[in-house]
Image (spheres, rainbow, N blue to C red):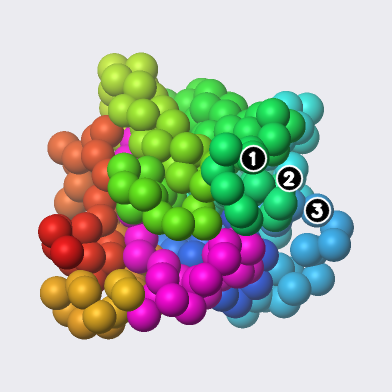
Amino acid sequence: MINLAGKTAVVFGLANKRSIAWGIAQKLHEAGATLAICYQNERMKLEAQSLIDELPGASGFQCDVSNDAEIETLFAAFKQKFGTVEILVHAVAFAPAEDLRGAFTNTSREGFRIALDVSVYSLIAVSRAAAPLMPEGGSIMTLSFYAAEKVVPNYNVMAVAKAALECTVRYLAYDLGSKNIRVNAISAGPIKTLAARGVGALGEMMKAHSDRAPLHRNVDQLEVGGAALFLASDLASAVTGETLYVDCGYNVMGY
């Protein structure tokens, strides 16, 4: 059994009970980690806080990861409250709805900028802020998707963002490796999250995955949480710069 007692885990991206961040938070909590769970804004606070209250000892924090001042303020609060942070989960992604529909060639310049800023640059920003609070090393992880490497209709600009995210993971792993900070991505199969509902034909995508994956089903949040728990633990002490697939094997199939 993995024991994370005495370690602080920061989880970004909690929106509601369908969030992958929620599955990860539950698994880290079960393992004994002290949780700091972050939601984007005041509008999301009510639902997020009701979930946070289900995890005794967990604390809620508001932070828009596209705002450097909010990130700086947040990590100053973490330093004061926790002293150190050992685990950071980046479960954040966003692209304007209009850029997730129709032809990819119609992607707007502003939509492209927003998708890359919120979904990718934010990982750099929070990793930079977290590193000083990881004097003994730590584990940083983010969430990707198979569209980073193969065409998934309707995923459009978010696929480009996920490809950039996986590349960012590798460069952060190299940059932070000397500090014993590991950086990895989890590429989860499709899940009916708030963000995924913005992608067209989600139901068709999920059926295709369950039909073709070797396990003949779709993954759920807690299974992604289990993979995150592994990456957060000393069992993954030599794993960095990797993309770990948690998709019931779909990515290994040729057709």
Q: Residue at position x 70%, y 54% from top?
A: 97
Whether residue 74 is in magenta: the answer is no
Q: Is residue 16 visible?
A: yes
| Location of mark 1 (residue) | 106
Along the viewing direction, whichever of 190 and 87 lies nearer the viewer: 190
Q: Is residue 83 left or right of residue 219?
A: right
Q: Amino acid at mark 2?
A: Cys
- Residue 142 percent across, percent down from the top left: 43, 46
Q: Earlier in the sequence, mark 2 or mark 3?
A: 3
Q: CA distance from mark 2 to mark 1?
A: 31 Å
Q: CA distance from mark 2 to mark 3?
A: 7 Å
Residue 56 falls in which quadrant of the image?
bottom right
Along the viewing direction, whichever of 94 and 45 lies nearer the viewer: 94
| Location of mark 3 (residue) | 41
What span is in magenta? 183-207
Q: Residue at position x 78%, y 63% from top?
A: 44
| Location of mark 2 (residue) | 63
- Residue 213 percent across, percent down from the top left: 20, 73
- Residue 25 percent across, percent down from the top left: 49, 65
Instruction: Say whether marks 2 and 1 touch (CB < 8 Å).
Output: no
